[in-house]
Image (cartoon, helix red, strand yellow):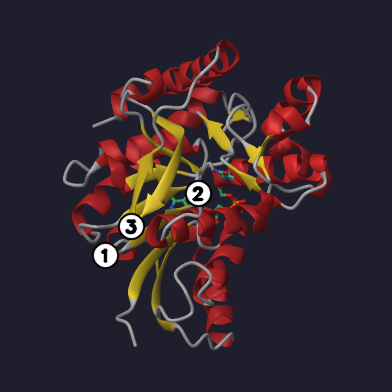
Amino acid sequence: MKDPVRIAITGAAGQISYSLAFRIASGDMLGKDQPVILQLLEIPPAMDALNGVVMELNDCAFPLVQDIIASDDPNVAFKDADFALLVGARPRGPGMERKDLLEANAAIFSVQGKALNDHASRDVRVLVVGNPANTNALIASCNAPDLDPGQFTAMMRLDHNRALTQLAQKVGKHVTDVESMIVWGNHSATQYPDLAHCKVDGTPALELVERDWYENDFIPTVQQRGAAIIKARGASSAASAASAAIDHMRDWALGSDGIVSMGIPADGSYGIEPGVMYSYPVICKDGKYEIVQGLEIDDFSRERMTATENELREERAAVEHLLG
Ligand code: NAX
């Protein structure tokens, strides 16, 4: 039996976590042979609800779960954490401007970054799901000076998975036939789902679909998918977001099957200068991710990659004073 790993989840009484915690507990993230200790964080008003979630987790009698810790203190929830999934965030309230939202979340993610810095495993892998995910990840990493910024990532995998399915359905193939999908930039409506390098069963995707469908249907559909789910379901994506978070962490820890999209610290690759958490095409291997280099970027792609970068720089500017 392997030693258990500690997995912290914030916003653990929320709707994403109601799927996420149970799937992690059943071994979907790290495998059916990896025991886990769940360390669940909530805010004080949600502790009763969190206790209910803990009761249900216990009632599942998951063989892999060694312990469950529920707390409203980040210093407790992140203690020795090997993985941290930062799902909890402040939602936009009535009358709240974008800047207010950024600031409210910056306050949360700076505290959590410090707690990770002081208490988590030195090898902790952090995934930020709570929106605005890329900028929240930036704030957390800036407040964790003893950890490598590359240990902080933002979730783009839901966008990536959405793009896979849109294309596969369009060409009448299965998602597993699609390779080298890329979503660049910010987890927002400016993200750029890029088919220029994508292949389906070995054929370039752009030879299989009309340019008009790509530009005027595929790209906006992927960009607006979150809003479409809210319209249809009356609530934002939850089980699909949890599934994407599991895909992201599993691939990071155990290796990816080809290219996946991850929000990571920009390092100058593809002309995106450091200072933002930008989604790049990466390959995960041996517990690490590496940006896929050398892809050709045409004018169409460049314009979209720059637009989403600019939005990230604006978000950064709004919280610059909180970057530690
Ligand atoms: P819910 O509102 O259902 O749950 C959020 C939970 O976080 C609540 O229980 C709340 O009490 C808790 N929370 C708030 N502040 C906290 C803090 N400081 N510490 C610990 N817990 C805290 O939201 P849910 O639907 O679960 O979504 C969570 C976040 O994911 C939202 O910010 C949402 O916008 C974001 N999403 C991000 C996605 C992505 O692809 N990156 C997609 C799905 C989702 O929209």
Q: Tell me whether circle 3 and circle 1 mark residues in contact (CB < 8 Å).
A: no
Query: According to the image, label 3 marks what residue?
Result: 287
SS class, disc 3: loop
**Of the two numbered discs 2 and 1 in the rendering, the one whose residue sits closer to the viewer:** 2
The residue under label 1 is 79
Visible residue check, residue 193: yes
* Circle 2 crowding by C-alpha within 10 Å: few under 14, some 14–19, many from 20: some
Label 1 amino acid? Answer: Lys
Q: Residue furthest left?
A: 146
Between marks 2 and 3 in the image, the one whose residue lies nearer the viewer: 2
- Where residue 182 sits: x, y (%)? 56, 35
| Residue under numbered circle 2 | 258
Q: Is 178 in front, or is 121?
A: 178
Task: Assign the N terminus to one quadrant of the image.
Answer: bottom left
How crowded is the residue under tag 1: few (<14 C-alpha within 10 Å), some, or many (20+)?
Answer: some
Q: CA distance from mark 3 to mark 1?
A: 21 Å
